[in-house]
Amino acid sequence: MDNTVGHLFAATGRLARLALATTALATLASAAMAQELTGTITVWSWTNPGKGIEAAIPGFTALHPGVTVKVEDVGNPAIWDKITTGMAAGGAGLADVLNIGIDYIGNYIETFPNGLANLSTMGANDLAAQFPSGMWASGSGPDGAVYGIPYEVNTSGFFYRKDLFEQAGIDINSIATWDDLIAAGPKLKEATGASLFALDKAATVADSANLWQLLTALQNSFYFNGNGEITMNGPAGVRSLEILKKANDAGLVADVPGGWDNFLLTVKGEINVAVVPAASWAAGVFEGQAPEMAGKWGIRLPPAVEPGGLTAAISGGTYLSVAETSPNKQAAWEFVKYAMGTLEGQQAVYKGGGMFPGFKPMLESAGFVKPSDYYGGAEVNRLFIDELSQKTPTVNYTTDYARALKAYTDAQTQVLLSGADPKTVLDEAAALVAGQTSRTIAN
């Protein structure tokens, strides 16, 4: 035999034996991990997200039979007060795993630097490429340390009454911008009696700001920039409020108090509006709560604010985090990793709770995209996947989001109920937030 060939065969044999040995060691390590992990971990969540998390427990405990997982439905918004109280008490009484909203996690990271476990030290960075970059960044600290793994990724849906647009003779595909939509509003209202969309003009709930937030995000802006400076009164924020004022002044906006009950009445068509801008999670709500409206609702991406602009934005989302004070931190992390970062876990979570995931292998898995009879054969999940493929802006909620939100909704009410000038009231709102905080207003 040629010596070179002989050496190759010998090397190949050594590599094969090494691979077998490595595989055996990995198997032993996995078995050891399964045996070593013991105890009980508790997860705080609420309603549907909690159901999704519960659905992942059987698969996890099959791998780690020594661990018991309990999910507590704390309620929303009660969960935020409970987490904040625990954080302020140095982590006392917190659950091992915490379901945290994108609008709260940055606050917790900044205000309570030792409140959440640094998951980067446990291997979380290995999952980074499997999630949308914007969502991943929002769950990380300024130094890149990871404090939450994305659970729900709520992109922005634009639900519209197909029957009303058809009755008015308006092609929904002709609506490329929000100005196009408002221009079509009078014709649509004359033909159908429907308002264009609804707003809680008195801002009785915080969700009253959702549409402004969407419009502003579509212009790659928000209340604050990446440096934490106030931008709510910048050109994008002003343009967004001008759009709402334009529609309101034209008599196209229904004044509907916020809240779940009125949202469901809108979904059922009992509150007569032509469009409902809502997050991706709402797609399942339409189907589940208003089956009689099948074929009447359509779904598409939101119009752009400016021609050729973004039609995608992250309108919300949640994370699973591990409390730094958890007495069973490794087991808590292994559960989070299984539920959020494996295809098996994600399939169980999605089936159990129906929350739109951000885990890319789940989005690419067989059967995830399929036609919806309810929406006239539209591939709803494909729509949201395509939205994630756009460069969705990263939003910085900061520790002062609640202050900015209150200042904005007060400004919006002045515009919608008293006809105030958008630029003037937003300048006043920004100055108010600056006065309440140490933040400066961006140039």
Image (cartoon, helix red, strand yellow):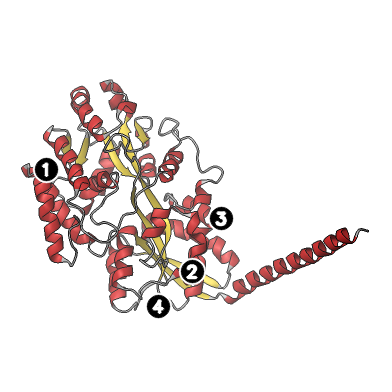
Report helix, strand or loop for mark 4.
Answer: loop
Compare residues 265 and 33 and report the one nearer the observer. Answer: 33
Residue, disc 4: 325
Residue, disc 3: 344
Residue 119 occupies which quadrant of the picture? bottom left
Q: Is residue 258 among what the camera can see?
A: no
User: Percent position (x, y) of residue 354?
Assistant: 43, 49
Q: Residue at x 86, y 60 (%)?
A: 4
Residue, disc 1: 416
Q: Residue at x 28, y 22 (%)?
A: 167
Report helix, strand or loop for mark 1.
Answer: helix
Compare residues 412 and 74 and report the one nearer the observer. Answer: 412
Q: Residue at x 32, y 27 (%)?
A: 172
Residue, disc 2: 333
- Residue kind at label 4, given as amino acid type: Thr
Mark 2 vs mark 4, CA separation in Å: 13 Å
Classify 10 Å Cα crowding around label 1: few (below 14), some (14-19), many (20 and above): many
Q: Are marks 3 and 2 in contact (CB under 8 Å)?
A: no
* Residue 3 vertical position relative to residue 35 in the rendered view, above or below: above
* Residue 91 vertical position relative to residue 294 in the rendered view, above or below: below
* Residue 396 vertical position relative to residue 298 in the rendered view, above or below: below
User: Percent position (x, y) of residue 205?
Assistant: 19, 53
Mark 4 vs mark 3, CA separation in Å: 28 Å
Mark 4 or mark 1, which has the lower sequence index? Answer: 4
Mark 4 vs mark 1, CA separation in Å: 46 Å
Mark 3 vs mark 2, CA separation in Å: 16 Å
